[in-house]
Structure formats: structure tokens, C-alpha cells
Amino acid sequence: MRLKLQTMRAALVAIAVGSAATGLGACSGPSGNVSFVESANGPQPFPTSYRTDLLAFLRTYLNDPVGVRGASLAEPVQRSVGGNMRYVACVRYAAKDFNGRYAPVQERGIAFVDGRLDRVVDNSAEICAGATYQPFPEMEKMTR
């Protein structure tokens, strides 16, 4: 009876771990970028709620979303991301690290598919080159 119970527990743990790994695998794209949608065909609509979507995402993406400094945002423009035309908004900010100290200014490209936030492009130097940034005070006012 005890062996049967241990076997059942092991099977349940294996199923849970496999399900979690499958679910997480859908959230990371090549090179570790966060990705929710792999592909979409056809012309892409402008992401009309990009500011709201971006704030909601950054609230969970940042280790500590409170007290972000120097936040600025560039309106979405079309760029090639992974060989597909996507709207990309670029954001710059200084946020607190794990120790509560401010990290250097970060720049991230945020790609949208079908008008919704799709992925964060960590290596955004090329994709955000020439971006015209404007203050993004809503990001500096984020709470947990």
C-alpha cells in the first residue's frame, strides 16, 4: 500500500512538472525573450492600447515596479522582428534591482502582434535605434 501511494505521488509530481514546463516553454522565445504569440500573418493593426498593455506587463516584468526613474517611451513603429513586420514600442527606465538599488538605465523593445503585446526584445539597440522618446510618467507612478 505504501509503495503504491509513493508511486502515485511520483506520477502526479511528474505530470505537474511536465505541465509547468510546457506552459513556461510557450512564454520564452529564442534567445530568452518573452514571447506569447509565435506568428501572425498579414498586415498588423496599430496597438491602440499599447500604453495600458505595457504598464500592466511591466508591473509583473520588473522585480520592483515601485519608484521607476527616468521612464520614457517611443510610440510604436513598424520594424522587422524575427523576419516579420511588427509594431515595436521602445521604453527606457531605471528600476530597482534585487537589492533595492537602482540599476543602470535599461532599454527594451516591446513587439506587438495583432494589436497586443507579444514579446520583449532584450537586445534592443538595433530595433530601437533612432526612436523618439517622450516622458512616460505613468510608469514612474506604478505600484505593486
Image (spheres, grey):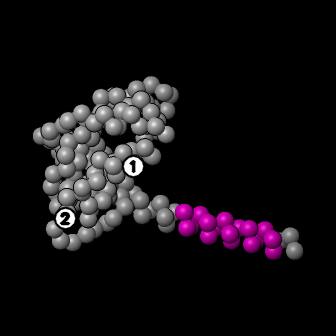
Q: Amino acid at mark 1?
A: Phe
Q: Residue furthest top?
A: 101
Between discs 1 and 2, the one toward the N terminus = 2
Magenta span covers which residues? 4-20
The location of residue 69, given as percent across then percent down, is: 34, 28
Q: Which residue is mark 1?
A: 57
So how many labels did they put on this image? Answer: 2
- Crowding near pointer 1: few (<14 within 10 Å), some, many (20+)? few
Q: Residue furthest right?
A: 1
Q: Can residue 17 be seen from the camera position used here?
A: yes
At 26% from the left and 61% from the top, the residue drawn is: 115
The rendered magenta stretch, by its main secondary structure, is classed as: helix
- Image quarter for residue 28? bottom left
In front: 10, or 127?
127
At 81% from the left and 71% from the top, the residue drawn is: 5
Q: Which residue is mark 2?
A: 44
Q: Which numbered marker is on residue 72?
A: none
Q: Does 77 sit above or below residue 91? A: below
Q: Residue furthest left?
A: 130
At 39% from the left and 34% from the top, the residue drawn is: 141
Q: Secondary structure at mark 2?
A: loop
In front: 22, or 96?
96
Residue 1, magenta (yes or no):
no
Quarter of the image with the N terminus is bottom right
In front: 72, or 21?
72
Residue 6, magenta (yes or no):
yes
Q: Amino acid at mark 2?
A: Gln
How far apart, in angstroms, are the residues tagged by discs 1 and 2? 20 Å
The location of residue 58, given as percent across then percent down, is: 39, 44
